[in-house]
Image: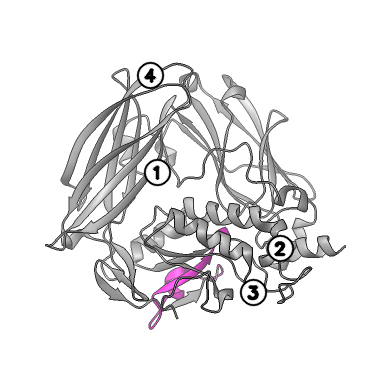
Amino acid sequence: MKIILLLLAIFSFGATSAQSLVLPFDRTEPFRTAVVPYGRAADALSAEPARSNYVAKLSEWSVTEDGREYSTSFAVPVWWLNRQTIVRVGRSTSAYEVLVDNRVVGYACSGATPVEFNITKLAKEGRHTLTIRQIDAEQNRVAEQYALKPLVEDVMVLCQPTIRIRDIMVSTTLNDAGEGVAQFSVAVKCDALNAKRARIGYAVHVNDSTVVAKGYSEMSLDMRREDTVRFVARIPKNSLWSLDSPHLVAVELENRIDNRPAEYVRHSVGVRSADVVEGVMQLNNSPVELKMVDYNPSKPVAEQVTAPYNGVVVPAYYATDKLLSECDRLGIAVVVRAAINTLPLAEHIRRGGNPSNDPFWLESYLDFNRAAYYTTRHHPCVLGFAIAQGKTTGINAYESYLMLKSLESRLPIIYEGAAGEWCTDKISIR
C-alpha cells in the first residue's frame, strides 16, 4: 500500500507505475525537438505540417468508454515505401503503449514529453490502425488530481528517408562587434542496411530574406550510424533574439540522397547568447533579471507575463512546441520543469521518506529530466531547467543535476528543494 500511495503522488501529469518507473524509456527513438519533413521546398516555407505529403496528423479518435484507449487509422501511400515511418505522440495524461494493427511497438513511461516510435517494419502500403493505450489504472487518479481527464494530444505520423535529419541544435557566442556567431549542428541518422551518401544543403535567413550563410556538406553513412553536419552563420546584432526584441532566424535544410531530393526541413530559431555570470543571467552579454511566475494552463501565456514579470516556470507536460514557439515569438522567458512533484510527500530523507533521496527512483528522475531537456532545448525562450517540484533534496536530485550539467554548460539548472545548496546553480530568479 505504501508503494501505491507513493506512486500516486510522485510524478505529476501522467507518470507511471512502479514496474515501468524503474525502467528507462524503452523501444523509442532518441528524444528530439519536432522535425517536420517536407517533400518540396515551397511547402517547407509554409511551416505547416498539413502542407507536407510526408506527415499525417491524427485527430479523429475512437475512444473506449473508460477513456483509456484511443484508436484511429492512417494510410501509408506508395511514396512512403523504402523510407522510415515514425509515430510522434505529443503528450498523454498517463503512461501508454503504442500499437499498430494490434501489435505493440513500444511504450512510454511518461506522457509528459513527446516520444517517437519507429514503426517502419509494420508500415506497409495501405491503411493501418494506430492505438494508444494508457496503462496503469492508478494513473488516472494522478491526472484527476490536476483536473486532467484521460487525454492524448498532438499525435502525427512522419515519413523520413533512410538517411534523415534527426535533430537541429544551435549554440551562439558573440564577437567583438556584438554580432552573434551561431554554430549550427544538424544530426543526420542512417537507417539503411548498407552505406549511403547524402548531401545536406543549408541556408540561414534573417528578416525572412537576407541570406547570411549558405552551403552544403556531403557525407557517407553505413548501417545505424549517425553523424553531424556543422556550419556557422554570423547574425547581425539587430537580429539577435532577446526578451525585448525576439527576432527569429530561418534555417532551411535540403537532404539529397544519391543526388535526388529526399526531404526539406525548415526551422525558425532564435539566435542568442545566454550565460550565468556571478549568479546573474547574461543574455547577449547584457544582464537580465528573471522574474518568473508559475504557468497557468487556463490562461493565455501573454496574459500571465505582465510587469514586473518576464517569464514563466512551465511543467514539462505543458511545455509543448506550440506554447514554447509562442514564447519565442513574444519574448517570454521559460524555465522548463521536469514532470516530478514530491510536494505532497514526506519532507524527511530517511528510509521511507521523500523519493528525492530514494535510489529506487533514480532512473526515473534521470529519464524525466533528460526528456524535458532534449524536447525543449531548441527554443530560445528556454533559459533554464528545473529538476523537480519539491521541498526536499537527495541523491536523485543531485544525480539529475550532474546529468543536466553534463548536457548543458551555459543555462542554469535549478531545484527549489535544494535550499540554495549543492544541487542547484546560484542564480537570481524571483
Q: Residues within 10 Å of mark 3 (few under 14, many from 20)?
A: many
Q: Is residue 224 above or below residue 143?
A: above
**Amino acid at dot 4:** Lys
* Residue bearing the label numbered 2: 358
Choose mark 3 or mark 1, whichever is in front.
3
Secondary element at image label 3: loop
Residue 219 in percent (x, y) is at 31, 26
Query: Closer to the observer: label 2 or label 4?
Result: 2
Mark 3 vs mark 4: in front? 3
Residue 48, disc: 1
Q: Is residue 320 visible?
A: no
Q: Amino acid at mark 2?
A: Asp
Q: Label 4, label 1: how many angstroms apart (C-alpha)?
A: 29 Å
Which range is magenta? Answer: 297-317
| Pointer 4 or 1: first along the chain | 1
Task: Give the number of the mark in front: 2 or 1.
Answer: 2
Question: For the residue labelled by badge 1, is the local secondary structure a helix, a strand or a loop?
Answer: loop
Closest to the camera, between mark 4 and mark 1, is: 4
Labels 3 and 1: the sequence-earlier one: 1
